[in-house]
Structures are given as C-alpha cells and as structure tokens.
Image (spheres, rainbow, N blue to C red):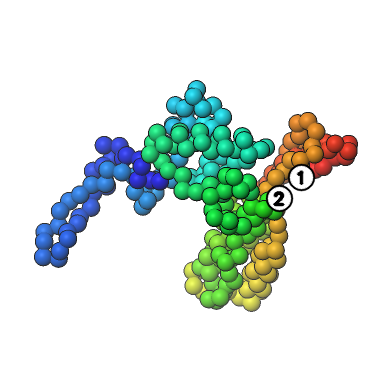
C-alpha cells in the first residue's frame, strides 16, 4: 500500500540510505522515492492519498467515494450494504477509484458468497477483532491476549495493556479501568522492572481475569435490525469524573411489531 505513494521530492533527501552488494565494495547512496513502511507518518499519508482519490472521483462515483471517505481505515475498508446488488456495484467502483492510484484490493471478505473472495473462511481479522462473517459477530482475537507471564512489573503491565487493540471502543468501559490502574503505577514511582507489591499484583491479576472473561463476549456487527421501520434515532450521553470521562451513543429503532429496540 505505502509503496504506491511517491515521496515529495523535497523530502526524498531525508530518505537516503547506504547499500552495497558485497562487503568489499564502497557503499553507494540511494534514496527512497516512494513511501516506506518505516516512516512514522506513512499510514496517515497513505490514507490522505486514498481520500484524494475519493475526492477526484466524487462526480463519477459518488457512492463509492463516500464509502472510502467514511469506512476506510488505513488498509481496511469496512462497510456494508442492504443487498448483494448494491455491494457488487460499490466494490466494482472502489476497484476503479483505487486503480487510479495503482492501489490493489487484496481480497474482499463478505457474508455474501457472491462477493466473498476468501475461499470459504468463516472468520477474518477486522479492526483488531475477529469477525464471524456468517453470524455477523465480533469477538476478541484470543491468540493475541495473554496474561502477565513474565512477572508483575510496570513494563509487563504496560505490555499487557498494549495488546488490547480496540480502535472502535467495544470494551472501553472495561479497559478504562486498566488505564487508571496503569496511571496509578506511574504516580507510585516504580521503575520499569521493579517487582510490584502483592496488593498491586492482585489488582492486575483481576485485570487479567477480566480480559479472559471478555474473550467469550460477542458483539453484533449490525446495529439496525432487518425488521426496523423508518430511520433510527441516535441518543448520546457523556459524563466525567476525577479519573476519567466517557461517552456513549444509543441507536433506537421501531420494529414492525411496534416494539422498541435500543442498541
């Protein structure tokens, strides 16, 4: 993805490196002309390139351009459509838009067999979670979450917390407590590799157990039920205290049987 984006000529001098094919040779100086994975702003620059392609394609492909602006996250595009006809149209147009910048779609994952290109895989990674395509559920990536196996130090507590990749905030009400506990470690003045007191160890043991409990949770990907009538209402709330603040949004839908569903 990144190599499809040219580095600004004024910045190419800062992407110089030495290379030689044999140890006996004098190294030659080369420059990267294309965006490199190691560049810190590379994801943002590549995302801006995709947004630019969407902008210049707005008149020709308005729906697909909007899809890229709203539902592209670095190298993932995570959208949904009401039926396979709409989905086929959007995927074809996205191919065309990204093709203008020589970006290639690796594979489409879908719960529709007409669109899915994964060879029948039931699960796929999506924004830090596992997506069960047939059930329409999100779960944690279990293989990436482990306990504190190397001792209870500030370094290992931070390492444990860093594994909880949750960019869409599904479990933020739980993980905010872990961040408060980590903040307390900083305030206590422990060095990176000090073994923590038993009382603090117990706190982090409970945190590990909480994560193990979360591994069995499933979240519906679809927020609007199939038998919903009309446009859903969105209600937002927020609150804050001395240690943290947070917000949430609820989607309220009226169903065909005149019942009310809050998600």
Kindly report which numbered mark, 1 or 2, lies closer to the viewer in this rendering: 2
Query: Residue 177 or 90: which is nearer the viewer?
Result: 90
How crowded pointer 1 is (Cα within 10 Å; few <14, some 14-19, many 20+) is rated as few
* Total count of labels: 2
The quadrant of the rendering that contains the C terminus is: top right
Rounded to the nearest whole Å, what is the CA distance between mark 1 and mark 2?
10 Å
Query: Residue 118 or 56: which is nearer the viewer?
Result: 118
Residue that badge 1 annotates: 263
**For residue 118, above or below residue 81:** below
- Seen as rendered, the residue at the extreme top is 59
Residue 220 marker: 2
Q: Position of residue 12 (x, y in %)?
A: 26, 42
Query: Residue 187 or 133: which is nearer the viewer?
Result: 133
Q: Residue at x 30, y 37 (%)?
A: 8
Q: Residue at x 40, y 46 (%)?
A: 1
Q: Position of residue 128 (x, y in %)?
A: 57, 55
Displayed quadrant of residue 131: bottom right
Q: Are marks 1 and 2 in contact (CB under 8 Å)?
A: yes
How crowded pointer 2 is (Cα within 10 Å; few <14, some 14-19, many 20+) is rated as some
Q: Residue at x 57, y 48 (%)?
A: 116
Secondary structure under tag 1 reads loop
Q: Residue at x 57, y 44 (%)?
A: 115
Report whether 236 appears left or right of 164: right
**Of the image marks 1 and 2, the number of the one nearer the N terminus:** 2
Q: Is residue 175 visible?
A: no
Q: Position of residue 25 (x, y in %)?
A: 11, 61
Q: Position of residue 95 (x, y in %)?
A: 47, 37
Q: Is residue 106 visible?
A: yes
- Seen as rendered, the residue at the extreme front is 114
């Amino acid at each position: 993805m990144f190599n499809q984006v040219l580095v600004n000529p004024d910045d190419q001098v800062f992407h110089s490196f030495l290379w030689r094919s044999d140890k006996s040779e004098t190294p030659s100086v080369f420059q990267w002309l294309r965006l490199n994975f190691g560049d810190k702003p590379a994801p943002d620059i590549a995302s801006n390139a995709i947004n630019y392609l969407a902008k210049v394609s707005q008149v020709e492909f308005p729906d697909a351009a909007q899809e890229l602006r709203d539902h592209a996250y670095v190298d993932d595009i995570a959208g949904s459509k009401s039926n396979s006809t709409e989905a086929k149209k959007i995927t074809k147009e996205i191919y065309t838009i990204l093709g203008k910048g020589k970006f290639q779609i690796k594979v489409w994952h879908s719960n529709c067999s007409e669109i899915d290109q994964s060879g029948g895989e039931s699960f796929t990674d999506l924004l830090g979670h596992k997506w069960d395509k047939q059930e329409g559920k999100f779960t944690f990536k279990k293989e990436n979450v482990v306990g504190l196996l190397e001792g209870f130090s500030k370094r290992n507590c931070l390492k444990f917390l860093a594994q909880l990749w949750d960019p869409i905030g599904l479990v933020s009400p739980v993980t905010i407590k872990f961040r408060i506990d980590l903040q307390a470690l900083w305030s206590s003045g422990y060095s990176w590799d000090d073994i923590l007191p038993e009382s603090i160890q117990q706190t982090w043991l409970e945190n590990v157990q909480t994560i193990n409990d979360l591994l069995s949770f499933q979240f519906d990907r679809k927020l609007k039920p199939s038998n919903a009538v009309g446009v859903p209402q969105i209600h937002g709330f927020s609150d804050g205290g001395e240690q943290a603040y947070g917000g949430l949004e609820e989607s309220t839908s009226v169903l065909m049987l005149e019942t009310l569903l809050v998600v």
